[in-house]
Image: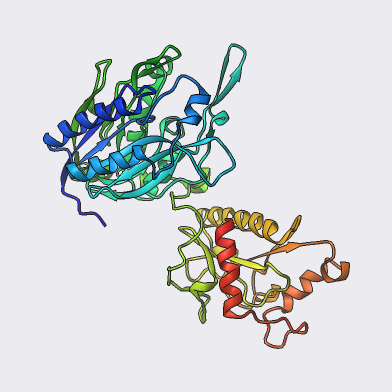
């Protein structure tokens, strides 16, 4: 955890990026140094802080990996000035991918120059109507996760990029995961900026009761593209604390006050007054599916069974995926809610059900790919009379082929009924630790 003071100064930085990366860095460097001298502990840079080129071809050609020279320069800048940085949108090249499209990557760098979080933009702007064609997916790959807020001296920061601003569910997901600041580095066009920019920013702040920091690109970048600017810092009450109104690069400083944030949430208790039973629940933001191989946390499955770390290949905030120690067919996996005393499906909350079955989908896709299957059996034995051997909700995910059980594909149900009984009629083999470890590793790599 990063230590937080009751009040912390932050800076929002506005840029006018061009294709000249060295120029862009020099301008950002000067502004960051000035902000540091004025007491800022963290500076927020806009989308495309690295460059804005005049064509898709140039953009793709000039993309860089995260360990490239541009990010290294900013890491050294953070280290030299002892300041945290939000780098709002790197044109990230993935050297290991055959897809030439770039990721739009938002990085948080700490005051030691270390990258502590990476978010890849999930919402890509795609518009193709008569007279207007702007397809971000032609040159960008989408990310696949809403990232859990990262702890910084400025608070817990939820990371978005530009178009993400238009999706309130995205903001609520991060706020539910503990975000105190939402940041939307952007390069809004002038027409949409005039119409929507401030309204959207203040709306996200008010509905989530978070600070919102929005660093923007500004002015003409080339003959084809101009940006709206008007970078802002907004408090949880919707008040604009800082605003760069000039049509040029600059910075502005405001103070994040955690006592004020707490008071706003007390004055308007929207989080406790929600009615998810009427309109559904939004899942809190979390890290990407999968878990590190050095995670030694066990999972208590029912009252007496302990699932060991080597079996576990996925964790979400509310669910866990693990290798079945006695599979009825190769690739037989289990997904279960993390919460104890969830003996029946009816005991799960809407949020738990959503999270559980989202992970089931991910695991199903992975095992079908790994085991070369085109179908799956997905089953819940909900209660003892349905064959449940451990009183904890668990979903069986079994990749299927037409040749299973000699073509008698419905045999699966008899096998599931007996598979974990002590004297099962089918003599199903117990997997070794090495086998479960290897299967878990393969699943983790394919989720």
Placement of the N terminus among the 4 image quadrants: bottom left
Residue under the image location 27 percent in, 31 percent down: 234
Q: Nearer the viewer, residue 405 or 238?
A: 405
Residue 245 in the image: above or below residue 136: above
Quick check: can you spot residue 348?
A: yes
The location of residue 7, given as percent across then percent down, is: 15, 43
Q: Quadrant of residue 410?
A: bottom right
Residue 115, how many percent across, how many down?
Answer: 33, 48
| Residue toward you, 229 or 79 | 79
> Residue 55 at what x, y percent from top left?
50, 21
Q: Position of residue 191 (x, y in %)?
A: 42, 14
Q: Is residue 98 left or right of residue 154?
A: right
Residue, x 77% and y 82% (percent of image)? 426
Picture colour scheme: rainbow
Residue reaching furthest to the right:
407
| Along the line of sight, the residue nearer the viewer: 185 or 77 | 77
The residue under the point 49% across, 30% down is 61
Residue 210 in sight from this viewpoint: no
Please identify the quadrant where the C terminus is shown: bottom right
Residue drawn where x is 34% and y is 37% of the image: 70
Task: Find residue 17 and report its image quarter.
Answer: top left
Q: Quick check: 320 above or below 253?
A: below
Q: Is residue 84 left or right of residue 355?
A: left
Q: Is residue 279 above or below residue 303?
A: above
């Amino acid at each position: 955890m990063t230590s937080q003071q009751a009040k912390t100064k932050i800076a929002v930085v506005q840029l006018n990026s061009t294709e000249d990366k060295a120029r862009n860095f020099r301008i950002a460097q000067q502004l960051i140094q000035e902000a540091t001298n004025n007491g800022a502990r963290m500076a927020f840079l806009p989308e495309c802080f690295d460059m804005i080129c005049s064509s898709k071809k140039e953009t793709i050609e000039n993309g860089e990996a995260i360990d490239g020279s541009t990010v290294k320069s900013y890491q050294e800048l953070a280290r030299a000035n002892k300041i945290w940085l939000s780098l709002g949108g790197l044109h990230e090249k993935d050297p290991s991918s055959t897809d030439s499209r770039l990721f739009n990557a938002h990085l948080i760098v700490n005051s030691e120059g270390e990258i502590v979080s990476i978010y890849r933009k999930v919402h890509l702007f795609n518009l193709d109507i008569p007279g207007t064609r702007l397809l971000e997916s032609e040159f960008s790959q989408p990310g696949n996760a809403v990232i859990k807020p990262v702890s910084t001296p400025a608070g817990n920061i939820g990371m978005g990029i530009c178009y993400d601003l238009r999706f309130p569910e995205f903001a609520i997901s991060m706020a539910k995961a503990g975000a105190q600041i939402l940041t939307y580095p952007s390069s809004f066009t002038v027409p949409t900026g005039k119409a929507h920019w401030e309204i959207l920013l203040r709306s996200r702040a008010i509905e989530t009761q978070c600070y919102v920091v929005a660093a923007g690109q500004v002015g003409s970048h080339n003959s084809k593209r101009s940006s709206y600017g008007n970078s802002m810092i907004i408090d949880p009450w919707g008040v604009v604390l800082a605003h760069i109104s000039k049509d040029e690069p600059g910075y502005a400083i405001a103070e994040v006050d955690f006592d004020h944030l707490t008071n706003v949430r007390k004055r308007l208790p929207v989080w406790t007054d929600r009615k998810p039973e009427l309109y559904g629940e939004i899942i809190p933001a979390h890290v990407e599916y999968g878990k590190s191989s050095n995670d030694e946390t066990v999972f208590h499955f029912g009252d007496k069974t302990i699932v060991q770390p080597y079996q576990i290949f996925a964790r979400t905030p509310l669910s866990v995926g693990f290798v079945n120690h006695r599979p009825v067919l190769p690739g037989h996996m289990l997904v279960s809610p993390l919460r104890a005393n969830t003996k029946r499906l009816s005991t799960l909350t809407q949020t738990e059900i959503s999270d559980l079955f989202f992970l089931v989908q991910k695991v199903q896709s992975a095992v079908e790919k790994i085991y070369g299957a085109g179908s799956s059996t997905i089953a819940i034995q909900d209660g003892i009379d349905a064959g449940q051997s451990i009183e904890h909700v668990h979903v069986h995910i079994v990749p299927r082929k037409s040749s299973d059980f000699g073509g008698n594909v419905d045999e699966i149900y008899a096998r599931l009924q007996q598979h974990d009984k002590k004297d099962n009629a089918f003599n199903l083999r117990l997997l070794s630790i090495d086998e479960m470890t290897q299967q878990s590793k393969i699943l983790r790599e394919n989720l």
